[in-house]
Image: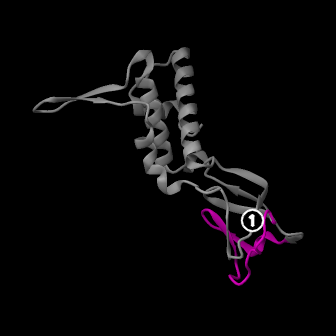
Amino acid sequence: MIASIAMFNTYSGNYEDSSEAVLLKTAFLCTAEDIVTSYLGFDPISKEYTDVAASGTGSRRLYLPVRNITSVGSLTVGTVEVDPSVVKAYDDYISFIDHATKFPIGEDNILVSYTAGWEVEQMPSVIVVSILRIATLMLSETGGNIGLTGKSFADNSRTFVNYSNYRKYLQPLDGMRILGF
């Protein structure tokens, strides 16, 4: 899990630690992580992707359907194996180091194995906070509540209603989304 129970307890202010409460909190965190992953269009946790077929566009960059590409393990262009040391990994694409070589135009003509994503300890805070916000809203809705919260100010009080529309919690992730794959 990207966000821990301890983080969830601190963020939500709910420190209930019965086995049922921990199971429920774990379910909320896992569901919130699934919602964030689906919204991003890729799994943000670092892992190896192998045998991913891509289509060359005739450009220097080959965009891949993830973020934070950390290394390229193997690369086959057409039927030719390419030494992975001649390519450099960027955030969401790889490119040849010499800048003159291009990925040839073709459909499913490139096979690449690479590692991408973040280790849980280095996960961008915007992802962690989005997961915590969604999970906390789910927690506030338990028992038939609709996510009411209140706040008292010096001159009056306000009541805030949150519904299960997670869009406002996901919106900060817009710059990290992978679209078009």
Q: Amino acid at mark 1?
A: Ser
Kindly identify the residue that appears in the image at 30 percent across and 27 percent down: 149
> Counting other residues with Cα less than 10 Å from the Cα at mark 1, is it few (<14), some (14-19), or many (20 or more)?
some
Residue 119 magenta: no
Kindly identify the residue that appears in the image at 73 percent across and 78 percent down: 102
Q: Position of residue 48 (x, y in %)?
A: 74, 52
Magenta-colored span: 82-109
Q: Quadrant of residue 179?
A: bottom right
Residue 106 magenta: yes
Q: Is residue 61 above or below residue 145?
A: below
Residue 120 falls left or right of residue 96: left
What colouring style does the render use? one colour
For mark 1, what is the residue?
55
Q: Nearer the viewer, residue 47 or 172?
A: 172
User: Which residue lies most toward the left here?
Assistant: 155
Q: Nearer the viewer, residue 179 or 44?
A: 179
Q: How many marks?
A: 1
Residue 62 falls left or right of residue 67: right
Q: Position of residue 90 (x, y in %)?
A: 62, 67
Q: Is residue 81 above or below residue 33?
A: below
User: Which residue lies most toward the bottom here?
Assistant: 100
Kindly identify the residue that appears in the image at 53 percent across and 37 percent down: 3
Residue 70 falls left or right of residue 111: left
Disc 1 element: loop
Kindly identify the residue that appears in the image at 71 percent across and 62 percent down: 71
Q: Quadrant of the C terminus?
A: bottom right
